[in-house]
Amino acid sequence: MAGAKSALVLCMDVGFSMSNSAPGEEPPFELAKKVIQKFVQRQVFAETKDELALVLFGTDSTKNQLAQDGQYENITVHRNLTVPDFELLEEIENQIHPESQQADWMDALVVCMDLLQTETKGKKCDRLIIALLTDLNTQASPEHLDVIIENLKQAGITLQFFLPFPVEENEEEGGGDGDRRGPGHSGTGKGLSRQQKDSLDMMKHVMLSLDEEDGLDEIYTFRNAIEQLCMFKRIERRPMAWPCQLTIGSCLSIRIVGYKAVTEERLKKMWITVDAQTNKRDDVKRETVYCLDDDNETEVQGEDTIQGFRYGSDIVPFSKVDQDQMKYKHDGKCFAVLGFTKQNLIQRHQFMGNQVIKMFSGKDDEHAAVALSALIRALDELQMVAIVRYAYDRRSNPQVGAAFPCIKEDYECLIYVQLPFMEDLRQFTFPSLENNKKFTPSDAQLSAVDSLIDSMMLVEEDEDGEQKDMFTVHQIPNPAFQRHFQCLHHRAVSPGTPLPPMEPWLKAALERPDVITERYQAPLEEMKKKFPLTEVEKKKKLKTSAQIFGKDAEEPDAKKKKGDEEEEDYNLADIAEGSVTSVGSVDPARDFRTLIRLKTLPFGEVCQQLTHRIEQLLSNKDTIYYMKSITCIQAFREQSVKLGNADLYNSYLQSLKRSISNRRLEVFWDLLVQDAVTLISKDEVEGSTVSKTEANQFLVAEEKKEEVAAPPAEDMGDVDDLLDMM
Amino acid sequence: MAEWNAFYRNEDEEEQQEEGEQSGGDYYKITGRDSLVFLVDASKEMFIKGEDGQPSNFDMTMQVVRSVYTSKIISSHRDLVALVFYGTEQSKNPRNSFKHVYVYHDLDEPGAKRVQDVEALRGEKGAQLAAETMGSGETSLGDALWCCANLYSDIKLRLSHKRLMIFTCRDEPHGGDSAKDRQARTKASDLKETGVIIDLMHLMKPGGFDVAPFFRDIISPPEDESELGLQLEPSEKLEDLQKRVRAKEQKKRAMARLNLCLGEGINVAVGMYATAVTARKPAPIRLYRETNEPVRSKTRTFHTQTGSLLLPSEIKKSQTYGNKQIVMERDEVDAIKKFEDPGLYLIGFKPMEKLKIHHHIRPAVFLYPEEGEVKGSACLFSALLTKCSEKNVFALCRCIARRNYPPRFVALVPQMEVVDEGKVQITPPGFNAIYLPYADDLRTLDLPQCPSASQIQVDKMKEIVSKLRFKYRSDAFENPVIQQHFRNLEALALDMMAPEETEDLIMPKVEQINQRLGPLAQEFKDLVYPYGYNPESKPAPKRKAADAGGGAEKKPKVEVPEDELRAHVQNGTLGKLTVPVLKEACKQFGVRTTGTKKQELIDALTARLGL
């Protein structure tokens, strides 16, 4: 299995007829180019091992191995068989233009076949494909047609055609079938030139001789192809087999093999931190140091630390070695039945874990298949499930889970899902909604909801009694991945420009189907009338966000990472966007820098605005705001040093320090100390009255302060509410 | 294999992150802590041993206290607990203003030392120790209660729940001294006024314990049926207290408050709750080896060449695809993830049978209306719940649980309230939000063509299944890994010789199963397996041969010549090589990698041999 990949030759017609188009229509050349671009893009981001070659025909020059004595002219092998990369994408973008010759597409096909044959030698390729993009508007010689077909067959090459127009499956019926072609397809069999018609027949002949049944299925139009290719490839992973034995007691076991069938897929690559100037990863190093909680913050080596665990008010040292020795151990891999129970006792919402495993019978073992089938069918008939102990291997923790029977037309399996342990469950109780008169809906209200639901049913039966689902989530590609690749691609091909907006098709894919939106307007209006909803104004909330931050209130990120990452970024693009007139609340540090640079306001004034913001931030008593304040102070310092004016900064920092204990800002101060934000010393700015040692001493002296009780509970409440809101 | 392992690791990391969010240290500052004072009678009567060598009431009480201590330590170690004796000869209390009251443990977080202290008061030796240190003397419950009131008032922390438990076997502690009785009643009502709930744990007494004459006025009336009230037998309450719980207690707290948007202008406020979260071992604390004191960790990003700390604005993020490095600003990386503001957006409804059991990617969350955010939410929510349940449909929503989270789709499955005979809620009313997979999350499997079983074979299996039926309860299985960890910790903390035994509840009871099945197992095997077939043996020989061949070939060290490797790096085709080859190459070039994932190896090698 390993190493299985395909080799594909993209063979594109760049001859002069490809640039012809009806007015207002994109020429076939442009469409074909888009198809190629989209396809290569997908391949690059999917990082498949598939190899790709690009052959152009109709080129002014000739470059191919078969060219000899005026044969195979105007055919250029642009790129040999390799894994596609961005270079290829750039070449397609910049080097492929419509040219003025025409070449025989049959000749081009032969060049492609030859290329595939010579370049896949010694490589393990399980699929060979030639994709021909052309308008068929060239003279093609039918001489060697049979030889070519024979060769294609022998080499096992799949042929695909991409044409600017659709092809009728059956010409006799052609006229009547007009509406079967989707909208937007320009040109049909009519407006075709004689050459095109001849070529079309030849192409059909080739395709049908390769595959009598579905040969014509491999013929696509440019437009269709673009639509299908605009999606980035979904992430595919080769399923790993997990062979094991299903056991019932010690006497009965069945050989099974498990495959992870459903799991939350993640992107294969992570972001790497690089230096902003050099873009090099090696220039940045992240390091974690450990230090004692003493006055000197004595650093200790990582190797000199051990693990401990809290036991009430104590911390019990518990070295890794001891943990390994004492920890729960088990016999490893297993899938053992604990018992059977009714399916309805398993609650759907109590499924645990992040995956579903399908268990099939052991490979090439029909006896196991029969035994497992008996179990699956027995469970299915009794509407029961097996409760099992599942352990992946000796190192992983055992689970308890349910094995559901699953019988499909073409296969049978057990579906394994993890179930909760007692420790996982949180038995929360909530006030009843029924007993409270205030919350009990009236009959009129209930009927409004009733008609809303009816108007919004996504599954409907069509005339044939078949169910039609308008919105199948498991067919939507993960929008996060699509967006991710879209942005990466954009940045790669047009560096220096802001990220593009979301692609319209992606946005549409996530939206309610139009039919529903149309249909549910009336019931929705009824709902609005029947259910008065009023937002409760929260005084506390206002105080912490809207009032202080103005209408641009920035809510602290619920999932911010700890530490320095929380600071805001200095982003040039943003600055260029709006005109900054005062230090705002959203990104005060950035505004501050901008204002200093613009010099529209005097330095003192801008500093005052900044310190005002800092004070507001500090009044929130929360790490996120503290981090933001520190960013401001750093910006204050940086600009002061730049302008050689240390007084305002130094005096502010000194007064801030004096107020620390009164305002219970010890936590904030610790952060400031950690970030080593000192006073500005004489060494940095000449006018400063502070010496270097004094500047450094400034932080040290204050370092260890006895903590004064717990901060007032009220304040914490606010921030918590705010966080919860999100 | 590598893939599975990688998966498990990811899962771990993620859960830990989540745990961190939910059990944030700030939490206790917000809601306050629970507190519990054990007020224990230390009179002579308490030390009288029962018939047939039954432990004395005092001994039993200490057992209870110990078990509550150890349970608290694991379930909610920030709660405060105190142990106070009354009717002692000696006195020991904060200002020593009360005679015959002995504060053994002040109101504080329980720890190993305290558990050991209580342990020391158990048994024969314990009684002796109690006699030596405290002795038995006069009784004034009033003084004792007053002293406890002081304990509460000395606490500067916010307390959410205050409870006082009196353990005694004397129903008339003052022997009819009405002045003392009166004083005790006054003090008790003072305490109750400050929000302390007084509970009586009356112990065995010859002739029975009569609550009525004195204690009726001391204790708090039961709040509701679920509260441990007077109607319970004392022994039952004790058993309840003795039940060891080794699970971290989780407070009810919304993960997020969101708007459920039915359409333009109709927003229902809902709270999102995690009702089932994989419990993990508590996170370890790093200690300095020499002194066992906790260390702090600081993570810094600095420039390798200049050594200076890097500001966030001085770093960027990058990924490499198709031989090209693509660089983005840090906020751009965040911006990519953002689709819209957090919320639930209704798409439509589907019949319940459209929800497939295998469409599972992560544990569900629970939704309940937030009347406090948007007035009218509860009513609309309730109507929606009723109707969805009635029509047997679920609501399909696009869900963004937090800022900068990409959208996921969820099925809102109605769950009506269920109460038991005692009107106690078993399942709360609300919607369970089931996360649905995207196309990327479903894997394509090669389905083997397999024969099916005949009805005779199926029927035999049905007999087996019926023999092993049981009633599944989701809280019936403890996690042996966590249980063992807590027991180990307990043993270390309390200097025990060995940790308590952990019963592995998810181990199949093989003996019992075999016994119940009897001849059925063999009968089934005779029906499905040919003679001599052994399912335990290795797979079919065909595969064996293939394996042997492949294995032998792969075994010898696989090295790739350096120039070839460099060529791969240049062309970005390292991915063609297999993991063992890459590992070997890493060794060859002295590249240290922590990862075993293919991509990590590739990245490491590229970094070393890079352009």
Image (cartoon, coloured by chain):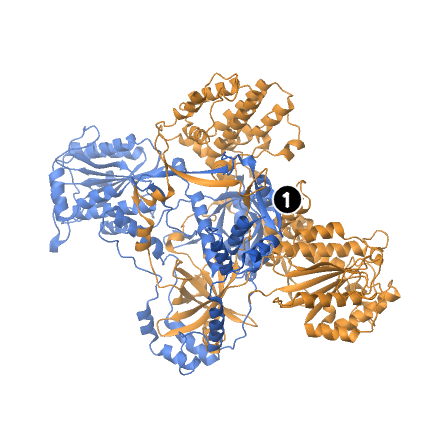
Chain colours: A orange, B blue
Give the percent coordinates (x, y) of residue A494.
69, 44
Give the percent coordinates (x, y) of residue A164.
79, 60
Q: Quadrant of residue A150?
A: bottom right
Instruction: Please tell me whether mark 1 sits on a helix, a strand or a loop.
Output: loop
Residue closest to the eye, B326 or B244? B326
Quarter of the picture containing the N terminus of chain A is bottom right
Q: Chain of mark 1?
A: B
Residue at left offset 32%, top offset 35%? B195
- Disc 1 marks a residue whose amino acid type is Glu
The residue to which callout 1 is attached is B264
Give the percent coordinates (x, y) of residue A563.
47, 37
Quick check: B512 left or right of A551? left
Residue at left offset 49%, top offset 40%? A724
Quick check: A436 left or right of B147? right
Number of numbered discs present? 1
In the image, residue B143 sits, relative to residue A611, either above or below, namely below
Most distant residue in the bottom direction: B531
Residue at left offset 26%, top offset 54%? B500
Residue closest to the eye, B104 or B418? B104
